Image (spheres, helix red, strand yellow):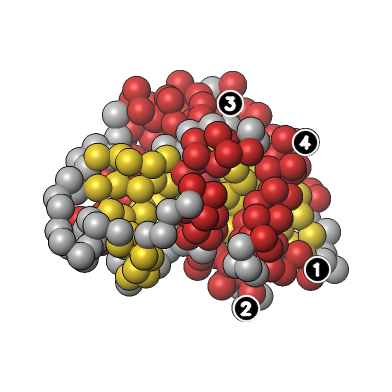
Amino acid sequence: MSVKIGKFGFVNNYLPYYQLEQNGMQVIEALPKQLAEMFEKGGLDFAPVPSFYYIKNMAKLKSYDFCVASKNSVLSVILVSNGKKREGDNESIAVTNQTVTSLNLLKIILHEKGLKNRIVPLNEGKASELLKRCNHALVIGDDAIKARMTYEVVMDLGEEWHELTGYPMVFGISVSRKEEDMSEINRKVMESVVWGKKNVDLIVSAAEKKFGMPVEFLARYFRSLTFQMGAKEKRGLELFEEKCHEYRLL
């Protein structure tokens, strides 16, 4: 039986999986929250899952080197504003239903800043829809990249986390079930990551055609991310877990 491999259906997984898929590896693409649900139901054997999901379920998971983390600014997990002032709604933040990690990261940042914004979860992903309900919106992934080209960015959550802790923010980490060993798949993914870093200009060009995003942004974006769990990333993830416990999010 073939191994079922997942990846985030965002631009942020385009570079790490590029060579792997060019070489014919079949990969299942979905939103981070959906990947966790698919993994939970046995539909995937190896995939990046949201960090919050990993923290909640780490007792039954085995983690690997591949991750999705921001060195400083993440660029694709942002709070945007439509610039409008609506009485009674100034403290509300509409949040996409596509996120679990970024939602809890936002809650931590608000706590740390002493802010009491009301969070309004909505069954939407696009900033334009979220901003119909609230003055500010939390958007992630490709919708966030598109939103930053239209709306005012008032907070980059990766940058806020780095300023708060001095460490990277790990948004996703690759896992398998505890009893399974996916080290060989992880090795292949990491080889693809290394190849991608060495050939970033080629990947940027391919990504421009696929996603219709500016070359300058894509080059900056891919270089803002890290895809390997090093010592700093591990500490960043530990701090995220500690803050989740501190603010009773777990």
Location of mark 2 (residue) = 41
x%, y% of residue 117? 37, 59
> Considering only order in the chain, which callout, 3 or 1, is on the residue closer to the N terminus?
1
Q: Residues within 10 Å of mark 3 (few under 14, many from 20)?
A: some
Marker disc for residue 197: 3
> Considering only order in the chain, which callout, 1 or 4, is on the residue closer to the N terminus?
1
Marker disc for residue 98: none
Q: Is residue 227 visible?
A: no
Disc 1 and disc 2: Cα gap in Å? 17 Å
Q: Residues within 10 Å of mark 1 (few under 14, many from 20)?
A: few
Dot 3 amino acid type: Lys
For the N terminus, which image quadrant? bottom right
x%, y% of residue 78? 39, 45
Q: Secondary structure at mark 2?
A: loop
For image coordinates 35% across by 48% down, the residue present is 79
For image coordinates 72% across by 69% down, the residue present is 57
Up the image or down, 219 lies above or below 52; here it is above
Question: Looking at the image, is mark 1 or mark 3 nearer the viewer?
Answer: 1
Dot 2 amino acid type: Lys
Disc 3 and disc 4: Cα gap in Å? 20 Å
Q: Image check: 47 left or right of 78?
A: right
x%, y% of residue 238? 73, 50
Question: Looking at the image, is mark 3 or mark 4 nearer the viewer?
Answer: 4
Q: Secondary structure at mark 1?
A: helix
Question: Looking at the image, is mark 2 or mark 4 nearer the viewer?
Answer: 4
Dot 1 amino acid type: Ala
Location of mark 1 (residue) = 59
Would you identify the image quadrant in which residue 49 lies?
Answer: bottom right
For the C terminus, which image quadrant? bottom right
Taking depth in this image into account, of 31 and 17 the one nearest to the observer is 31
Disc 4 and disc 1: Cα gap in Å? 21 Å
Q: Is residue 164 visible?
A: yes
